[in-house]
Amino acid sequence: MRSSDRPPGITRISIASDVSGALGFVAYGDPAHRYVVTRNALLDTICTLFGGREAECLLYDDVSLGAGQDLERASAIARDLVERQGLAGKGSTLDGQVFAADKPVSDNLRFHLEAATKEILDQQRDRARKIVHEHRTQLESLRDLLIERKVLDLSTHGR
């Protein structure tokens, strides 16, 4: 992977509430990186959104409301990949076709669009689950550090 293809690194993680009502968040560096978005970058984003949910399931055997919001965001991205970007996947009959949200589609086509969206979500959830399980020890250490400090900032905690 070339360095220009890598997603921006994490610069801050917080479990402290903020004034916008968020119970926690992850901030990424290099805001300019978001202007060139690839299919793989969007799949990585979906995987990351599932990562928090899968981590909660693994460590707490439960999920928070924030994980529900992550699921909504992941679903919206997957739907956009399929319907607006025509990126349902290699070999798909939908690949390369773009479907305007304001134009009606047949029930059969809607079924295929929903199936392609679900396939993306299922693949990225499985990928996130695998990553979380493979890195459980590091995840537990990160959890414990966040519980202790509430905020981890790259500028004060190093790399």
Image (cartoon, helix red, strand yellow):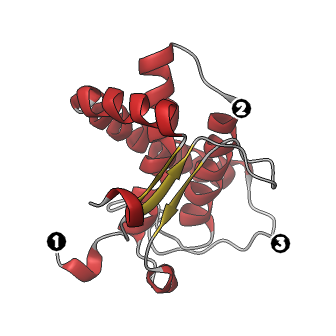
Position in image of residue 143 (x %, y %): 42, 31
Image disc number at residue 1: 1
- Mark 2 closeness class: few <14, some 14–19, many ≥20 residues within 10 Å: few
- Mark 1 closeness class: few <14, some 14–19, many ≥20 residues within 10 Å: few
Q: Secondary structure at mark 3?
A: loop
Residue beneath the point at 71% across and 44% down: 17
Say which amino acid is labelled 3. Answer: Asp
| C-alpha span from label 1 to label 2 | 34 Å
Residue matched to label 3: 102
Number of the front mark, 1 or 3: 1
| C-alpha span from label 2 to label 3 | 31 Å
Say which amino acid is labelled 1. Answer: Met
Q: Secondary structure at mark 2?
A: helix
Q: In the image, is residue 9 above or below residue 78?
A: below
Q: Quadrant of residue 128?
A: top left
Position in image of residue 57 (x %, y %): 49, 21
Q: In the image, is residue 67 above or below residue 155?
A: above
Residue beneath the point at 34% across and 26% down: 140
Residue beneath the point at 60% across and 23% down: 63
Residue matched to label 2: 65
Q: Secondary structure at mark 1?
A: loop
Say which amino acid is labelled 2. Answer: Leu
Answer with mark 1 or mark 3, whichever residue precedes in sequence.
1
Number of the front mark, 1 or 2: 2
